[in-house]
Amino acid sequence: MNTFDIHGTFVVLNEIEQNYAGDTMCIPYQDNGCLKAYIIDNKGTTIKNMCFNKICGFDEKSKPIMGFYQPMITACFV
């Protein structure tokens, strides 16, 4: 089993989303103002490590809310 070193300045992570077939998972997380996600297969191999700020043109001003331990990002397989 692989472990993933998700670290940063202020990391907020809540859930892991799995596709219907069970062969791909997504770990969405927030690191201070960066919205990111690990996409992994069911063997634990990283498929992609994405930064949505760059993809969507978000700035890094959306910081986590102190005392609210939910990231401002979630994932869904469609």
Image (spheres, rainbow, N blue to C red):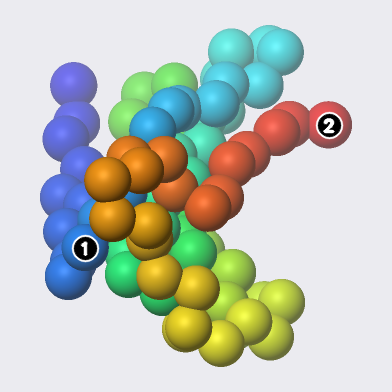
Q: Is residue 65 left or right of residue 9?
A: right
User: Which residue sits at x=59%, y=69%?
Assistant: 52
Q: Earlier in the sequence, mark 1 or mark 2?
A: 1
Say which element carries label 2: loop
Give the residue type that dot 1 points to: Phe
Whether residue 51 is visible to the viewer of this picture, yes or no, is no
Corner quadrant of residue 56: bottom right
Q: Position of residue 35 (x, y in %)?
A: 49, 64
Q: Position of residue 23 (x, y in %)?
A: 57, 20
Q: Is residue 53 above or below residue 6?
A: below
Total marks shown come to 2
Of 15 and 65, nearer the camera is: 65
Instruction: Please state, as top left, top right, bottom left or bottom right, where the C terminus lies in the image.
Output: top right
Q: Position of residue 1 (x, y in %)?
A: 18, 21
Q: Residue furthest top?
A: 21
User: Which residue sits at x=59%, y=13%?
Assistant: 22
Corner quadrant of residue 53: bottom right
Q: Position of residue 34 (x, y in %)?
A: 43, 72
Say which element carries label 1: loop
For label 1, the crowd category at 10 Å Cα-Cα, with few meaning under 14, some 14 to 19 and many 20 or more, is few
Residue at label 1? Answer: 10
Q: Residue furthest right?
A: 78
For label 2, the crowd category at 10 Å Cα-Cα, with few meaning under 14, some 14 to 19 and many 20 or more, is few
User: Which residue sits at x=53%, y=53%?
Assistant: 72
Residue at label 2? Answer: 78
